[in-house]
Amino acid sequence: MPSIDVQWTPRGFGQTARQDRWWVQPLLVFLGLSAFFVYANWAAFQGKNYFFGPYLSPFYSPELFGSSPHSWFGPKPGWWPAWWPFSPAHLILWAPGLFRVTCYYYRGAYYKSFWADPPSCAVGEPRQHYRGEHSFPLIMQNVHRYFLYIAVCFIGLLSYDVWKALWFPNPATGRESFGIGVGTLVLATNVVLLGGYTFGCHSMRHLVGGRKDRISESPVCQKAYDCSSCLNRSHMLWAWMSLVSVMFSDVYVRLCAMGVWTDWRIL
Ligand code: FES
């Protein structure tokens, strides 16, 4: 059997023969993810200004317990620990957060940007051995497929929020009437972008058809697989657009609730 000798030359951290600006992308990823992490945590700890009229911030949806009209089970529960500040976001944000943290795209991105493993392709890293994801703790990344199921439920819940964002209190009749505000469009855009990210997930491709040996024998699976694959081709783009949109949706609702921004009605 023919064989090829591959010479591996250890490199020092950051050493490379690359001539391009390989460090730009990991740096941008580091800055982007850090900014999102800081903002999301700040917003989650606020516990207020997360709703405005029919709008609910996606960081707080579904609101299981809370003081807004969107709350499912009423106000802050009695069992909430006194030493931890109450925020409805703390009950639910772990699910979409872990879905993103374990995403195949984000893993590749933050392994490079946050712990230089390696900093970029063909660039020396600050360790001698490949550690991989075959042992604890990184083997836990395999739970991604299960968080996909939860993420799909979140898409349904956020879609319902968009439906609710179409119904505004009408002081003349004392009932709700149909309308579209800028906030409605912001929340709707967010769901579309989150849907593009979620339904283009690598695990979704496997779920809807990739697991079959002969997918062509099932036209429905074939179609679903093609659609998911189409979204998957731009998975990185969907990941970033949806990350920005979910953050902007919270900013929008928050600033409207604080009276800083006016929610213009289109209809
Ligand atoms: S691989 Fe990115 S969301 Fe599943």
Image: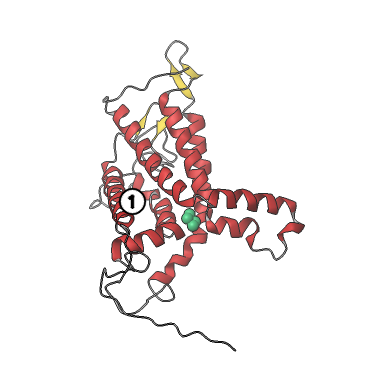
Residue 204 visible: yes
Horizontal arrangement in the rendering, residue 226 relative to residue 191 (left or right): right
Mark 1 element type: loop
User: Percent x, y for residue 86?
Assistant: 29, 45
Up-down: is 31 above or below 157? below
Front residue of this view, candidates 37 and 43: 37
Residue 60 visible: no
Q: Amino acid at mark 1?
A: Trp
Up-down: is 193 above or below 208? above
User: Percent x, y for residue 94?
Assistant: 38, 53
**Looking at the image, which residue is at 47% across and 22% down?**
180
Front residue of this view, candidates 80 and 259: 259
User: Percent x, y for residue 69?
Assistant: 40, 31
Q: How many marks?
A: 1
Per the image, the residue denoted by label 1 is: 79
**Looking at the image, which residue is at 30% across and 71% down?**
124
Residue extending farthest top:
172
Horizontal arrangement in the rendering, residue 46 relative to residue 175 (left or right): left
Residue extending farthest left:
83
User: Percent x, y for residue 92?
Assistant: 40, 49
